[in-house]
Amino acid sequence: MPSLTPSPKSGSPDSIDFELTDFDEARHALDELPAGVREVHRLAPGYWEQRRRGPVPTDRALAGATLDWLLRLPPRVQPRHLAERYPRVVNAIALTWSDRQRSVAVLDDLIVDHRGGRRGFSPDVDAELHALRDYRAGLAH
């Protein structure tokens, strides 16, 4: 947006600095919510709890098929910290492993915060997720 060249008295208590603007742009700016306001509802108690699926027994333990999958992985990409701390996540990864595209997408969703506001995983777990993703995508041999 073009702004006017300040007058020699600009900045003095009696001057008013302004910027020329288009009325359509100004109306559009008023229609948009300020940054962060749209996301406030996510902070309300119970918001995320209502959207998550209910707990199942395999959330706290590795499934038999997951253990088999872990043992078939090369030792350098076995997610040991992830399996210890987040068995539910490892079970979900193992379920998708037979479909390369789907398993890479699941790993990408775990690595990248698409929703905003997630704390993320600890560095050791994050490194394991990246190693698994690279291995599954064929980037690491």
Image (tube, rainbow, N blue to C red):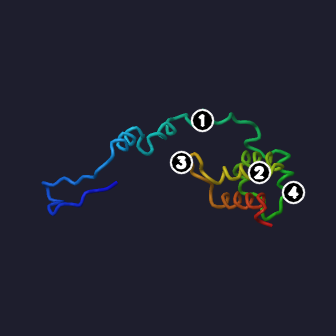
The residue that mark 4 highlights is 72
The residue that mark 2 highlights is 101
Q: Is residue 13 above or below residue 62?
A: below
The residue that mark 1 highlights is 49
- Alpha-carbon span between mark 2 and mark 4: 19 Å
Q: At label 1, which amino acid type do we have?
A: Glu
Residue at the extreme left of the image, as rendered: 14
Of callouts 1 and 4, the N-terminal one: 1
Image quadrant where one finds the C terminus: bottom right
The residue that mark 3 highlights is 117
Q: Nearer the viewer, mark 2 or mark 4?
A: 2
Residue placed at 35% from the left, 43% from the top?
A: 26
Tell me where residue 57 appears, x and y as whole percent: 76, 37
Sort mark 3 into few (<14), some (14-19) or many (20+) by Cα contacts within 10 Å. few
Of callouts 2 and 4, the N-terminal one: 4
Sort mark 1 into few (<14), some (14-19) or many (20+) by Cα contacts within 10 Å. few
Tell me where residue 138 appears, x and y as whole percent: 79, 61
Q: At label 4, which amino acid type do we have?
A: Arg
Left or right for 6, reference 90: left
Q: Nearer the viewer, residue 39 or 17?
A: 17
- Picture quadrant of residue 3: bottom left
Residue placed at 72% from the left, 47% from the top?
A: 89
